[in-house]
Amino acid sequence: MWDTPGMQGRSNHHASASSTAERPKVIYVMGAGRSGSTILGVALGNCENVFFAGELNQWLARSGIPPLGDPERERFWAGVRGDMAVEPELFGGATSCLERSSALFHLGKWRARRLLRARYRRVAEDLYRTITCAAGVTHIVDTSHYPLRAREVQALDGIETYLLFLVRDPQGTVASLGRDDVPERRFGVWAANAYLWLTYLLSVRVFLAHPRARRLLVRHEDFLADPEAVLRAILQQAGSSALPPDLQTLRSGVPFHGNRLIKLEKMAVEPHASTPADRSRVTALLQLPWAAVLALLRPAASASASYERPRVDLESADVQV
């Protein structure tokens, strides 16, 4: 067994995990980048029988080779890659037209989407099955973000998909997208707001099309306010009997891809007062309709108490639409 978060002591549970491997349970985290999906994924991955796989949309793009080269991560993902048979032409960026929201605007790619879809879905399902068996778990957390990828995953008959629509205060998301102290692409205020509009339009449609019993709206601020309560709600919705982990001793594990948090071996989530992001009038006006729409989505996880912003570095991963 791999000694990774949420997998310690799982040798006694391997038989039960293997018995459910025929239909793996995938917790897919959907929404905009820089919304806190990595820290949420890490926390879930520290729960028993849950494996944090990271952003699996990058698996085909990177030919199954993780960007971080630590030995444990390389061994795990080399084993996954070795157990799969993938047509070489699917590696690289060929399947991005099925995942990225912006692909909808490229009319010339619609035919390519139709031709790739069946093969893409076979590989996606095989990847989830292979990871489930390799990790010896019942649940996989995929933080790929893209709502179009979520729609493809919804269609996989051999996968039991649980959809988390993760949202964050748009002021914080837009401010994070505009940071110039990270190596990833920087978005201006107008571009960031357009990105949020497109992401929310597609995400709401995918969310409402998913069975109510297997979907959950999660606000990042609620997770920070009462992480144990939100984690319990997610685990219960996903049919897991696991308990929330010790949030002071979280281990990042071996996710395939993610933001810089996955480089840390250990981390903690603890409340800490900080100055909120500067408010933008443009963002407040443009995102006002979505505040009303998101407030109506059900079911939704909620925190049981008010919160102070924790000392956690939020999403710094590259955002591609």
Image (cartoon, helix red, strand yellow):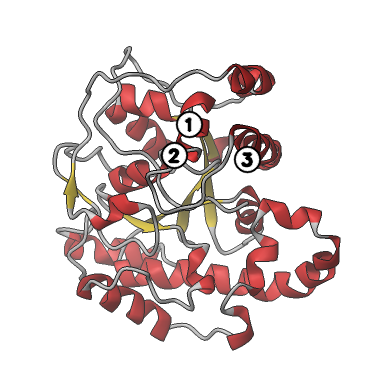
Q: Position of residue 172 (x, y in %)?
A: 46, 28
Percent position of residue 233, x then y? 39, 31
Q: Are marks 2 and 1 in contact (CB under 8 Å)?
A: yes
Give x and y (percent) for residue 82.
40, 86
Circle 3 residue: 211
Q: Residue at x 46, y 41 (%)?
A: 34
Q: Which residue is mark 2?
A: 179
Q: In whole angstroms, how far apart are the C-alphas of marks 3 and 2?
A: 37 Å
For the point 65% across and 74% down, which residue is it?
94
Q: Which quadrant is the N terminus positioned in?
A: bottom left
Res 49 → quadrant: bottom left
Q: CA distance from mark 1 to mark 3?
A: 33 Å
Residue drawn where x is 59% and y is 32% of the image: 189
Q: Quadrant of residue 103?
A: bottom right
Helix, strand or loop at mark 2: loop
The picture places residue 319, in percent across and down from the top left corner, at: 53, 50
Query: Dot 3: within a 10 Å radius of its alpha carbon, few (fewer than 14), some, or many (20 or more) residues?
Result: few
Q: Which mark is residue 175?
A: 1
Sequence-wise, the earlier of marks 3 and 2 is 2
Q: Is residue 110 left or right of residue 4?
A: right
Disc 2: CA contacts within 10 A as few (<14), some (14-19) or many (>=20): some
Residue farthest top in this picture: 306
Tell which of 160 and 106 is nearer to you.
106
Q: Secondary structure at mark 3?
A: loop
Label 2 amino acid?
Arg
Q: Earlier in the sequence, mark 1 or mark 3?
A: 1
Determine which of the numbered discs, if any, sits on residue 193 in the image: none
Q: Quadrant of residue 20?
A: bottom left
Is residue 157 left or right of 41 when viewed as pictured?
A: right
Relative to residue 129, is residue 303 depicted above or below? Answer: above
Q: Is residue 119 above or below residue 272?
A: below
Which residue is nearer to you in this view: 107 or 80? Answer: 107
